[in-house]
Amino acid sequence: MFKATIGNQRYSFDNLAILLAKASPHRSGDVLAGVAADSAQERVAAQIALADLPLRHFLNEAVVPYESDEITRLIVDRHDPAAFAPIAHLTVGEWRDWLLSDATTTETLSQIQPGITPEMAAAASKLCRVQDLIAIAAKCCVVTRFRTTIGLPGRLSVRLQPNHPTDDPAGVAASIADGLLLGAGDAVIGINPASDSPDRTHQLLCLLEEIRVKLDLPTQSCVLSHVTTTLDLIRRGSPVDLVFQSIGGTEATNRSFGISLDLLAEAHAAAQSLGRGTIGNNLMYFETGQGSALSANAHHGVDQQTLEARAYAVARHFQPLLVNTVVGFIGPEYLFDGKQIIRAGLEDHFCGKLLGLPMGCDVCYTNHAEADQDDMDVLLTLLANAGVNFVMGVPGADDVMLGYQSTSFHDVLAVRELLGLRPAPEFDDWLLKQGLLNQDGKVRLSELPSPVRKLMLPQ
């Protein structure tokens, strides 16, 4: 039991899961789950108790039982005591201060990553202001490679998202051309298919491969179908670069997605065997989002932000190229308004980076949330300052297939120019070769490049 006193009021928290939940900043999903603090005072009391909790305690108490959850077993069994040793003597509050200190550098953080559990990262985030979340994450550098190098300092990559409500090849190709001309696509050209039909997915993969080869484009492609579909397509010889899957922070959540760690391992090995990467072989692409466990009734009484961090343990196990939180996609039942979405996006990025993940964010909201594009501008700008590896590029910021609002090609251009950020180096060189960069290094179209003109107007 954990205790804290404020004035004459004494508060008790029966276990670690309850303590973490009560210490969480207010959000609608935790209220819906019945785990949120009953008052601001109780939340502060929980944060006081959490700040005094030794980090070692997280190695002795699981928020989801070890015996019944393979994610807990992964976290416990893969923990690195040697990497943990430099911070093993600290409490959560002391660790937060250590993370913010000048003496804690990018190199230091990379060395302790294998010793950090998701619950530790989540706990620290609950004691951080927004400014702290940005400052600490900005120290973390996680670099991955397939055909482009993603995550280098001074770079901001983009997933070009050319979704189409009927998967029409001409519509997809037009969106791809639009994005390329505006400097997007260095993280991945990734399509959410309107249908998970293997034949449709194969056709889209072939379209992306044809475009990549025709334009001599240094990037990777992905059709975001279920991992079982992708695994079957690998076996039949489809041109698969990245393996995509949505993941959650409990075994039961992943079961609701139709996956397990063994299945992900099988798909990872199959894709590795293709050897399609030219400068590296990070090839898994994972998406996450706060609230997925609750929506699957698989949350075990744990708050949604802690469960989100646990999903990152799954991702870390497979050394992915890309991981992103689709932060506002699930809806206001879980993140009610712009304030909650902004906070959640920064928390997710903070926790993922601390755990050594190449974190991106789909800066987004659904149309029934109390949020608008101004909120997304704020979150995008904050994440870029925090060193986010990549964000989404959607035509007009409006995904006409998934029916939600994200960030546009122009939004990313604006942030790159504001903060002096560039695309991945290989993609930057391609833009220069195509005449899409001016003398100041800004993406400016002076003349439609011949290869792109052929893509838009097939001969």
Image (cartoon, rainbow, N blue to C red):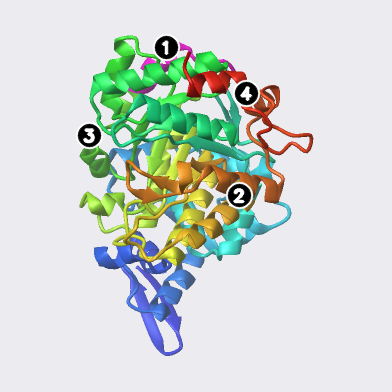
Disc 3 marks which amino acid? Answer: Gly
Q: Around disc 1, counting alpha carbons within 10 Å, would you say few (fewer than 14), some (14 to 19), or many (20 or more)?
A: few
Q: Nearer the viewer, mark 3 or mark 4?
A: 4
Looking at the image, residue 342 sits to the left or right of residue 85; the answer is: left
CA distance separating discs 2 and 4: 29 Å
Q: Mark 1 sits on what residue?
A: 273
Q: Earlier in the sequence, mark 2 or mark 1?
A: 1
Label placed on residue 258: 3
CA distance separating discs 3 and 4: 43 Å
Identify the residue shown where x is 33% and y is 43%: 72
Task: Determine contact: label 3, label 2, CB under 8 Å.
Answer: no
Q: Is residue 5 above or below residue 177?
A: below
CA distance separating discs 3 and 2: 33 Å
Give 297 or 379, whichever is nearer the viewer.
Answer: 379
Give the dominant element type of the magenta stretch: helix, strand or loop: helix
Task: Give the secondary structure at mark 2.
Answer: helix
In reply to whether residue 270 is colored magenta, the answer given is yes
Label placed on residue 384: 2
CA distance separating discs 1 and 4: 35 Å
Region in magenta: 266-280
Label placed on residue 449: 4
Q: Earlier in the sequence, mark 2 or mark 4?
A: 2
Residue 54, can we see it?
A: no
Task: Give the secondary structure at mark 4.
Answer: loop
